[in-house]
């Protein structure tokens, strides 16, 4: 079954762990969003890896929208989705003008800035709340999420930091992200296919990796269910910052 793929042992480990991580992220461990992307980008050429990751993300999205459909904050969903879809189009248009080597540092720098902003909010209490609750903040974060997910499947940290910044509780955050990214990832399929990033070879490999997504989803849901809100927020921030540093350096 695996004879058509010629990867090193290390690359296979990254692919298997990356697929598991996608499932765990969709299952409830939202802070892991950037880690599977890094695994695939180290096992495969960075830009090409996005075409392998996308079908696995959609697999996890389908599981998530079934399980978490009752905890979606539809008001936030409707606010976040339109600018995110516009950001997907902007990312598609920009892909021909950004070198593959620049993707990681660009997204890593953006995410680290957002982590710093979230930490500043925690330190300053309610002084920044009006800014985070503003329409312009939601618009900007939606555009940024769509842009980063199109060019590198790396919008998870952007979206989760946005939803933390507006104070969404853990399960509402997970449910709202599930539906948001289900729609966003589906919208990316025609663009990725037109760029040749999704093809028969990539679909064959992702089909083999899909069971790991399902296993990861079950594990992620179990762990998230036993994590307190504050611990969940710290977990998200630490994982996001670590992933951003890896992209940056």
Image (cartoon, rainbow, N blue to C red):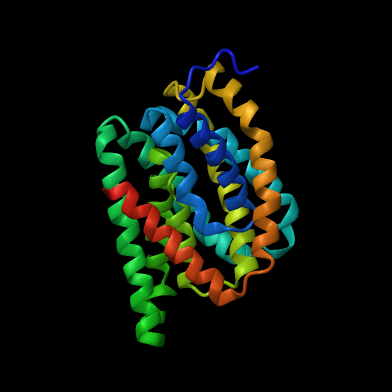
Left or right: 17, with 48 as reference point: right
Q: Position of residue 52 (x, y in %)?
A: 51, 30
Q: Position of residue 123 (x, y in %)?
A: 36, 83
Residue sitting at x 55%, y 40% = 17
Residue 187 can be seen, yes or no: yes
Residue 98 can be seen, yes or no: no
Residue sitting at x 28%, y 49% = 248
Q: Nearer the viewer, residue 139 or 63?
A: 63
Q: Nearer the viewer, residue 148 or 170?
A: 170
Residue sitting at x 52%, y 61% = 79
Asked if residue 160 is positioned above or below residue 166 in the image, the reply reads above
Residue sitting at the far front: 9
Residue 215: quarter of image = top right
Residue sitting at the far top: 4
Q: Nearer the viewer, residue 20 or 204?
A: 20
Residue 223: quarter of image = bottom right
Q: Position of residue 115 (x, y in %)?
A: 36, 66
Q: Position of residue 18 (x, y in %)?
A: 53, 40
Asked if residue 10 is positioned above or below residue 1 in the image, the reply reads below
Asked if residue 140 is positioned above or below residue 92 in the image, the reply reads below
Residue sitting at x 65%, y 34% = 210
């Amino acid at each position: 079954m695996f004879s058509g793929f010629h990867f090193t042992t290390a690359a296979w480990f990254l692919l298997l762990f990356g697929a598991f991580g996608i499932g765990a992220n969709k299952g409830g461990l939202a802070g892991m969003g950037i880690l599977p992307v890094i695994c695939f980008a180290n096992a495969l050429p960075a830009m090409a890896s996005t075409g392998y990751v996308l079908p696995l993300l959609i697999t996890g999205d389908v599981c998530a929208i079934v399980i978490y459909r009752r905890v979606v904050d539809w008001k936030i969903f409707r606010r976040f989705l339109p600018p995110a879809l516009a950001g997907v189009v902007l990312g598609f248009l920009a892909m021909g003008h950004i070198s593959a080597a620049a993707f990681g540092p660009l997204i890593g720098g953006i995410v680290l800035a957002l982590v710093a902003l979230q930490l500043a909010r925690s330190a300053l209490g309610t002084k920044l709340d009006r800014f985070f609750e503003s329409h312009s903040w939601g618009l900007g974060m939606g555009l940024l999420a769509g842009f980063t997910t199109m060019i590198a499947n790396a919008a998870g940290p952007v979206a989760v930091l946005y939803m933390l910044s507006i104070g969404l509780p853990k399960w509402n955050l997970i449910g709202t992200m599930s539906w948001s990214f289900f729609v966003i990832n589906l919208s990316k399929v025609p663009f990725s296919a037109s760029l040749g990033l999704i093809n028969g070879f990539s679909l064959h490999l992702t089909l083999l990796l899909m069971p790991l997504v399902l296993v990861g989803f079950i594990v992620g849901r179990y762990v998230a269910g036993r994590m307190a809100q504050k611990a969940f927020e710290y977990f998200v921030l630490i994982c996001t910052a670590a992933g951003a540093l890896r992209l940056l350096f």
